[in-house]
Image (tube, rainbow, N blue to C red):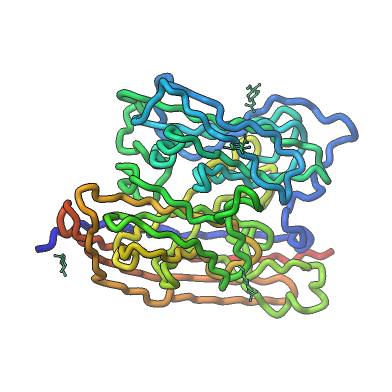
Amino acid sequence: MMHPSLYELSFLLLHLYFAAFISTTGASSPSLFDGNLELPGGSIPTVSLEHLDPTLPPALPTQTPHCSLVVLQHDFADTVGVTPASANYTHPSDCPFPWTRVVLELSVAATDLQESRVAAIWIDGAEVLRTVTPIPMARGAFWRVHKDVTRYTALLRRLADGGGVISMMLENSNKVLPGVFSANVSLHYFRGPVDDGGSKSMSNAAHPSVRSLYREPADLVLPISKPDGQYGSGFWYHIDNETGVESTTVAIPRNTYRAVLEIFVSYHGEDESWYTNPLRNNYLHQPTAAKLSAPRANGAFRQVYATIDGKYVGGHVPFPVIYSSAINPVFWSPVAAIGAFDMPSYDLDLTPFLALMLDGRAHEIGLGVCSALPHWLVNANLHLWVDYWSDAVQAGPVEYFVPAIQMNRNAEWRNPDGQSEIGAEGLERFAGWVSSSRGNLTTEVRHKIKLKSQVQVPFQPC
Ligand SMILES: *[C@@H]1O[C@H](CO)[C@@H](O)[C@H](O)[C@H]1NC(C)=O
Ligand SMILES: *[C@@H]1O[C@H](CO)[C@@H](O)[C@H](O)[C@H]1NC(C)=O
Ligand SMILES: *[C@@H]1O[C@H](CO)[C@@H](O)[C@H](O)[C@H]1NC(C)=O
Ligand SMILES: *[C@@H]1O[C@H](CO)[C@@H](O)[C@H](O)[C@H]1NC(C)=O
């Protein structure tokens, strides 16, 4: 007998329309803000200015936390290519597990002018926050990010039980501008009933793409990130092209009855504003357009996807978070673009694929980006729920339907102005059953993709 449990993931609505105007001079520098930050000599004002993220605020508890502690403090000055800042964690003994809610707070102040940078925070190699800094345009810029991290209870419990390492990366350079980012990372633990200001439905959910996914925090969270990240160039994988799939080998408990992969991405270099990239075309290779030394191209369609032992198991078109250096930096101060402070992560319900992984052996979870140009910073967390009443659960596949995404590409170029368009449409379905002490449940996942993008490059006489 089958009790259908239908997880309907309707990721519709990726109907993006970007009419991007890329100036032929600006396009050559990957960070559009390079060198444009010039104020009259020597008289940079000090303005205590708070930068804000306009994303709907997460429903955070309104009462004072049971305990709060600063877990990492660091000044990021010249940090390109250095190992992540990290700190050993010591949990206060009067604040035992379980907690009803845990909130991460990142508080940053910039000492001076600086460009926009990407940053991330990890707990024992599992990412809990990806964020982009605003552009401090005066001394005295500061901002705060609050994120509900209750879904990582399994990691936090390990911290509380026996320590662990909190790491943060923010690759900053003082070669051009003097600004140093001073960061404090804190954790706030709540016990007892919490008052979220009445919005119960959002509990445990920072901004999940499917609301119910983390209603019960997972029993285990495994990092799908660079294993030596603490001593190397961080936990994130660099993905430079569409064939570069980076993978981590994991063995999962044989009594896992549910699995969700949460993918974190940010895009840089030639793909920093991928949502405005035109389609590649011939004029870029002609001498008249020689100023376009970095032809950002490939069109405005990207999909971040995951594989298990090389088999495609789902993907997402990322939400185009606009960095504070993109399009026009003045647009994003002091209010940043949606999602810039707490970049969305992308959830893939892997429950239909549990049959591939329940043999107790190690399997490769891979991450890739369709049409990627250098470079993307990608890593993920594998959230697992285990059946304590079984030593092993059984699982089997039911459906695997992955037709190619239908793509329409159209480019019309005069020299060098013109426009290009991309339309993408696709529907994928995965289903599988898992038989545990909770019953024999079939999970069905549907991904619907619909995207339209138009990019115009206007002619600009030099
Ligand atoms: C669970 O249900 C599926 C289909 O509904 C069936 O094929 C499978 O044999 C069942 N598994 C067990 C262990 O009963
Ligand atoms: C963390 O603890 C380990 C030993 O357990 C020690 O080697 C390391 O230096 C400590 N790290 C920091 C940043 O204090
Ligand atoms: C970080 O914490 C210290 C106190 O420990 C405080 O003086 C400083 O202003 C804080 N910095 C930020 C950016 O919140
Ligand atoms: C793509 O990137 C991977 C690393 O992610 C690299 O090993 C591979 O050589 C690259 N392929 C091409 C065609 O550049």
**Residue 146, x across and y down, in percent:** 50, 33
Of residues 314 and 411, the one drawn nearer to the viewer in this rendering: 314
Q: Is residue 268 left or right of residue 379?
A: right
Image quadrant of residue 279?
Answer: bottom right
Of residues 222 and 242, the one drawn nearer to the viewer in this rendering: 222
Q: Quadrant of the C terminus?
A: bottom right
Q: Residue at x 43, y 51 (%)?
A: 222
Q: Quadrant of the N terminus?
A: bottom left
Visible residue check, residue 455: yes
Of residues 69 and 429, the one drawn nearer to the viewer in this rendering: 69
Q: Residue at x 51, y 47 (%)?
A: 127
**Residue 297, x across and y down, in percent:** 65, 69
Q: Is 257 drawn above or below residue 114 in the view shown?
A: below
Q: Is 235 drawn above or below residue 195 in the view shown?
A: below
Q: Is 54 drawn above or below residue 256 in the view shown?
A: above
Dividing the image into four quarters, tell me where ligand 4 lies.
bottom right
Visible residue check, residue 302: no
Q: Is residue 36 left or right of residue 187?
A: right
Image label count = 0
**Residue 329, x across and y down, in percent:** 69, 45
